[in-house]
Image (cartoon, coloured by chain):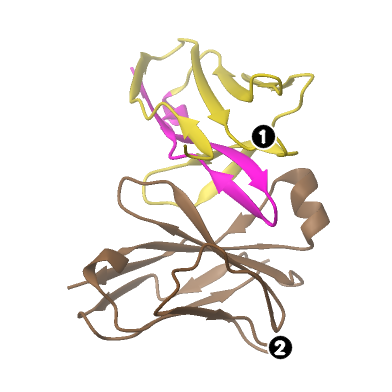
Amino acid sequence: NAGVMQNPRHLVRRRGQEARLRCSPVKGHSHVYWYRQLPEEGLKFMVYLQKENIIDESGMPKERFSAEFPKEGPSILRIQQVVRGDSAAYFCASSPNRAARLNTGELFFGEGSRLTVL
Amino acid sequence: RKEVEQDPGPFNVPEGATVAFNCTYSNSASQSFFWYRQDCRKEPKLLMSVYSSGNEDGRFTAQLNRASQYISLLIRDSKLSDSATYLCVVNSGYALNFGKGTSLLVTP
């Protein structure tokens, strides 16, 4: 009965390197959301994906950030050429379908991936 | 103006006290409202939905005022285990928008 699985839980990168964060949603969930939480800040929506489709990426920075949710395998959030300001906790959440999510408000969150950029 | 605004606190209250948190939202088209709880360095978890008629879940009562775009959460008989950050959440299109949270510390 696995929930949302995120890995790595902790990731350290030097400026200019790439960070890849992975998220496996709850089994049977086809909707994935990525949120970022900066230190002392609230959760900020980044992107909403369904299998093989990006539905809403209005919260994604215009450069260096990308996300995918392939037909097979986990969703990936990729940050290229990381900078110190990218240091944050990145949370992935899933829901079974958008209507259900809107009705219940329940996004199932993973424990987050904490990125530290040196 | 931020979409969801909350008093960050912290609220320090003794066990058994009643405490209330408030939240305002800017998008009048929002349809769904929630309170989430986030423990230190953990993921957020849904606490309860908020309905216009008001709703209660044990010691927790949530209220929504659509005219004022205002949401509240009341916790009665506070327990030590209630210590956490409480996030006001409002839907916006495809996503849920989270407030920065209000920090609660319940002391013995």
**Residue at the disc numbered 1:** B48
Within 10 Å of disc 1 (Cα), the crowding (few <14, some 14-19, many 20+) is many
Q: Nearer the viewer, residue A20 or B44?
A: A20
The answer to whether mark 2 and mark 1 are in CB contact below 8 A is: no
Which of the labelled discs sits on residue B15, or is there none? none
Residue that label 2 marks:
A71
In x, y percent, where is residue A80? 36, 84
Q: Residue furthest left?
A: A118
Residue A84 percent across, percent down from the top left? 22, 68
Work out whether B71 lies above or below B37: above
Indicate left or right for B72 with A18 as reference: right
Q: What's drawn in magenta, residue-wise? A: B80-108
Residue placed farthest to the bottom in the image?
Answer: A72
Colour yellow maps to chain: B
Whether the magenta-drawn stretch holds residue B81 is answered as yes
Q: Colour of chain A?
A: brown
Secondary structure of the residue carrying tag 2 is loop
| Residue A26, visible in the rendered structure | no
- Chain of the residue under the numbered disc 2 shown in the image: A
B31 vs A30, nearest the viewer: B31
Residue A10, picture quadrant: bottom left
